[in-house]
Image (cartoon, coloured by chain):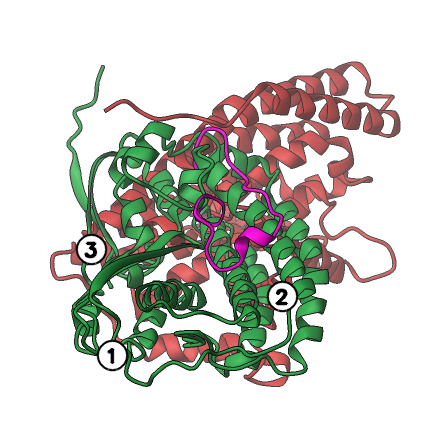
Chain colours: A green, B red
Amino acid sequence: MALKTEPFVINIGPQHPSTHGVFRMRATLDGEVVIDLEPVIGYLHRGIEKLAEGRTYTQNIPFTDRLDYLASMSNNLAYVIAVEKLAGIPVPERAEHLRVIMAELQRIASHLIGIGAFLNDCGAFMTPFLYMFREREKILDLFEMVCGQRLTYNYMRIGGVSHDIPEEFLPALDKFVREMPGFIDEYDQLLAENEILLARAKGVGILPKELAINISASGPVLRGSGVKWDIRKADPYSVYDRFQFDIPIGSVGDTYDRYWVKIQEMRQSVRIIKQAMEQLPPGEVLTEVPHLLHPPVGEVYGHIEAPKGELGFYLVSDNSVAPYRFHIRAPTLINLTALRDMMIGWKVADAIIIFGSIDICLAEVDR
Amino acid sequence: MFVFNPSFSSVNHYLETLPPDWPGGFWLHWGVFVVIIFAFVMSMVMAFIYLERRGLGRLQVRLGPNRVGPFGILQPVADAIKVLIKEDIVPAKGDKWVHWLAPVVAFVPALMIFAVVPFQDGALLADLNIGILYVVAISSISVVGIFMAGWGSNNKYSLIGAMRTVAQVVSYEIPLVLSIIGVVLLAGSLSMNKIVEAQTIPFILLQPLGFLIFFLAACAEINRTPFDLLEAESEIVAGFHIEYSGMKFAFFYLAEYAEALAISAIITTLFLSGWRGPILPPFLWFLIKVFAVFFLIFWVRGTIPRLRIDQVMAFTWKCLLPLALINLFITGIEVVVLPEALPWPVIFVNLAIMAVLVVLWSKFFRLGGGRVEV
């Protein structure tokens, strides 16, 4: 005998502990099963793209801090790379290396949050999350040393970085780099082989390779699906072509693969930081750049491999002090487009961890 | 329940079960014991809340509450005061009576379980000869309260939580009872006090598999991680008590911890030889064991993730139920065939059987469960 059931609509978000911000999913459930899903975004829209058109190129750097606030350094870097490309500004060697160090530290910090939040969504009551925070704090301390900020750094400048590193930075970084692989192992061992996590995450929310490419996903979401695509290798920016590192890829593209890829990427980031520290040249960290930049008329697209995917800035200059058009290619917004395909047919609990595994930041999605 | 409606024919029987030197009459006995139990449960719940928060703090590389009183020991008091002065909110479209009644229905059974828990030899409110049956019967009432809360709140999240709970608790009742029967077979009595008296060695050694099944099923019964699906913070926010505030919420909170305390006390009684123990006074032994079991419960909470609802159900029907039946079967054979071999050689046999069965089941059963075509 089949019971008569009736689907019902439930709003997951915009205020919900697992939507990582003000995201809303209008889910239609049949019992526990998600049969339809409609993502609703825009609750955190601040119009950054339009605001940026009214400010000078330098004034726009703090805006980028407020995109993905868990990876402000990377946002800074993507923007200044685009502007430097537009105006043809050279960057000193030392600044390039510092940028790489900061971007990779930021990747570790962002992935720690991503993994911690994902495990929290799986129901591991705060414990992994707080363990991840322990190391994230150390990274924030390092950032505080160089720029005095812990969240919105505003560290990168057009033509370099704002400050040279203080004396105590390198020893602290060295200590961090030596300790970190051990901590990553610890995080890996916390839950990687846990039967419950395997049962929850393996095979859940598969994003097929073709679909991942078709929606132009990027970052750990794309690599989890088994596509070896990383801007750092595919279109090297800064001085990434000088460092040895591997691109970890997943096999099937389920939530577990995305989790695994993030863990492996942290190891690679530590490797890159080590090399960048060894090769760190002395010298200037900031090129002389006119106070009011008038880039030549033209357009440019600068992109980097941010922790969450390909972060790109598309700038159009009309030779005035402000960009004529300022577009952000936000990786998490584009990764979210496959959400419905990944979630349909799974249960509510799965929907939450699938969403968690994409690792989004609403400030960047809505901008 | 017997306590509130004793017929005259049974009064004499109850009087016989009193400690012989207990002062005062029948009603005084009940009155005093009820007050003592209530005070005991409340103070233990406060101790549990404090312990869990501090303990989880340690597990989660943080400090935990340490501001109120020395070592934050008054934190539960501060919480209680806060909760008392909170506004009581009733959902406009909720079922007001059901919403009002639910916390009571959830809390009272948790308290009633303590009527048959022997704190030390003979020190229990009612030494029912069907004590453990009473526990099983009473403990499943609180699920009604939870479902009432889920229904009365008129909230989709609460309803999902409540539906999950009903499915889960009803399913886990079966392995729970089956694992208790193993103990009853060994003890030869349903009376809680007799069960403790029968434990010359703790039954956890004779019934390791039974203990495992009981512990897991009890965790599901009181909705602790990894079976805390009804509140599932990250999925359905708070589940059944999402629409509760103030003192009504506090009742659910109290009920949760009172149930944890009750389950710890029952595990102590059934498997850890209750108040028995050398040197220290019996009551202290009882407390030590209760706290040890509770520590285990929140240790699990601080460590592992949550299962999905279909996995939770698969776990009980595919793993716990067959294992409980096998355990019951083996225990029955042992009691009938090898009464003279009890207890020492059987301990090792049972441990070996448990190890083999658990490994076997973990090899052949995967908790997976995939996508549903829609």
Nearest the viewer among B331 and B11 is B331
- Give me the residue at 72% from left, 68% from top: A175
Nearest the viewer among B288 and A138 is A138
Query: Are the numbered discs 2 and 1 placed on the same chain, yes or no?
Result: no
User: Is residue B72 shown above or below B198?
Assistant: below
Task: Give the magenta-colored segment's residue range.
Answer: A231-255
- Residue B254, image x, y percentages: 45, 62
Nearest the viewer among A240 and B190 is A240
For disc 3, the neighbor class at 10 Å (few under 14, some 14 to 19, many from 20) is some
Nearest the viewer among B300 and A35 is A35
Badge 1 amino acid: Thr
Residue B111 seen by the camera: no
Pointers 1 and 3 in contact (C-beta within 8 Å): no
User: Is residue A251 shown above or below A302?
Assistant: above
Disc 1 to disc 3, C-alpha distance: 29 Å
Q: Which chain is mark 1 on?
A: A
Left or right? Give the position of B359 relative to A2. Answer: right
Name the residue carrying label 2.
B61
Q: Which mark is residue A41?
A: 3
- Give me the residue at 46% from left, 56% from top: A237
Name the residue carrying label 1.
A56
User: Is residue B320 shown above or below A86?
Assistant: above
